[in-house]
Amino acid sequence: MPGARPEALYVFDARTPRRRAAALGDIATGVRRWRLSFALASLDIRNRYRGSVLGPFWLTLSNAVMIAGLGLLYSSLFKMSLVDYLPFIAVSLITWNTINAIVTDACTSLTSAEGIIRQLPLPYTVHVLRCVWRNAVIAAHSLPIILAVFALTGAWPGWEALWALPGLALLAVNACALALFLGMLCARFRDIPPIVGSVMQLAFFLSPVLWKPELLGPGKAEWLVLNPFYVVMETVRGPLIEGGASPGVWASACLFTAAMAGLALGFFIRFRGRIAFWV
Amino acid sequence: MPHIQAEAVTIEFPLYHLGARSLKKRILANSPLRLRQDEASRIVVSALRELSFRIAPGERVALVGHNGAGKTTLLRTLAGVYEPVGGRLEVAGSIGALIDPAAGMDPHATGRENIVLRGLFRGLGEAESASLAEEVGAFSGLAEFLDVPVRAYSAGMSVRLSFAMATVMDPEVLLMDEWFLAGDADFMQRARAKLEALVSKAEILVLATHDMSIVREWCNRVIRLDAGRIAQDGSVTEVLGEA
């Protein structure tokens, strides 16, 4: 009960807004109350698939069909054996679809919570984590496909596959930063979501999702570390199918993640107080 | 000691997404009173303009004024939803806000799930929230409807649920909008007893309302807002006259 707490004090002074303390406090409270964001995310998923027989497994099914189709087509286009190509395309496509879903959903992380933001004083981090949880749980429904493909092709990775875990951690940090940054940006400027949509479509073809980086040939493949989508994806995909990602990829992924987190935090500290007016 | 101290608190709503410059000009030309351009040449509505007041423990304050005078905005600002663009605001004491009954309610979830969710919104644990469901369920009188999705409720039933959920608390500073007056007669009697208990336990009540009979009954101080400023501030008889 709120009354049981010791003296609660809310002070805001427009001359000394103490924005950094407010933003960091917001994040700390939001993370501590992760149960709330998880409960909201579970409700989101349930509502989205309400009345559907397969529920989130529709996504699993559509991913499986897409992987089978693209696997057959592109393995013959690239003149590779299906057994070699299928694990690649399966991990690749599922990782990409997860990234794509997070980026798209990030645009509405705050605007979709408008009703709550304007009525209840709640840490904004709760809405950001809600968006990340939601996508993480949906993405987890596609894991059986990867296992099935590994079993079918016999391409089980060794212990080095555990390196995918730090890769997933990097992805999670990026997801939080994006949901915060894009959520705020899209709340203020309503033209951003369509732009993000176009960028993601372009990035899908420019990044090695369907094609292997080696196809670029020597001298060109090295430049791929400048593609943030590729490096973050590769820290998850590499360990699962190629026995690990190169140090260059890890370094680049860590740098991009740090930059993204820094940008999101800076933006949040500066504009946190304005969010309630933006949504 | 719970108290509220406001010094020149100012809230301005920027009107984003207005579009064309000509539209902007037209709006500014038509209503020069509360709409103005700020330094970044955005159009802003001055919702609250340099409000200064102090509310001491034991005070029951009614906020009255026309629609759009800033009553609800002031409640939300006191609750910490909006950050003032100018001035200083200090609210000491745990805050309970009854502003929007449906805030944070998920229409597809059942009444019980919504109560648990509300508990989590308040920062309670899962077990505490579940025991909250029993208490709220009993008070709301929804019986078997507690396990039915909220969107299947009648308007009166959802008001009962909202009311029951919102009033399970023990705040020192109670901020209340007048929505709680809805509900069927039988429920209102019980609701009244509950509200009276809540209000008498709270050190400070701030109530936004249009209904002067409620003001006379519940409050001992009236702040009349007009176009975002304090027009009158004093005891009930000073502001409203003798009953």
Image (spheres, coloured by chain):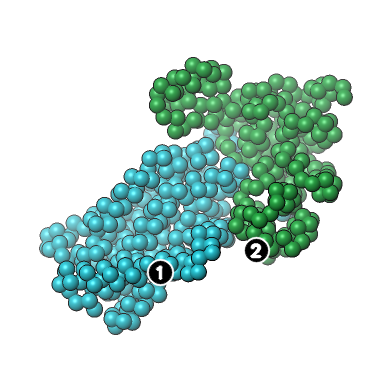
Chain colours: A cyan, B green
Instruction: Name the mark on residue A188.
Output: none
- In the figure, B146 relative to A151: above or below? above
- In the figure, A119 relative to A57: above or below? above
* Residue furthest left as drawn: A218
The answer to whether any part of residue A237 appears in the image is: no
Instruction: Name the mark on residue A60.
Output: 1
Task: Out of B70 and B30, give the one closest to the viewer.
Answer: B30
Residue drawn at 74 percent across, 36 percent down: B207
**Image location (x, y in percent) of residue A61:** 39, 70
Which element is circle 2 on? helix
* Location of residue A174 (image quadrant): bottom left
Task: Out of B195 and B124, give the one closest to the viewer.
Answer: B195
Residue drawn at 66 percent across, 43 percent down: B100
- In this view, the mark in front (2 or 1): 1
Horizontally, is A192 left or right of B72 in the view? left
Q: What's the chain of the residue with tag 1?
A: A
- In the figure, B154 relative to B135: above or below? above
Horizontally, is B141 left or right of B25 in the view? right
Residue drawn at 53 percent across, 48 percent down: A113
The amino acid sitting under disc 2 is Glu
The amino acid sitting under disc 1 is Thr
**Image location (x, y in percent) of residue A3:** 73, 50
Residue drawn at 12 percent across, 63 percent down: A217
Instruction: Residue under label 2, please give it.
Output: B126
Horizontally, is B84 left or right of B43 in the view? right
**Image location (x, y in percent) of residue B90:** 65, 36
Task: Out of A176 and B4, give the one closest to the viewer.
Answer: A176
Which element is circle 1 on? helix
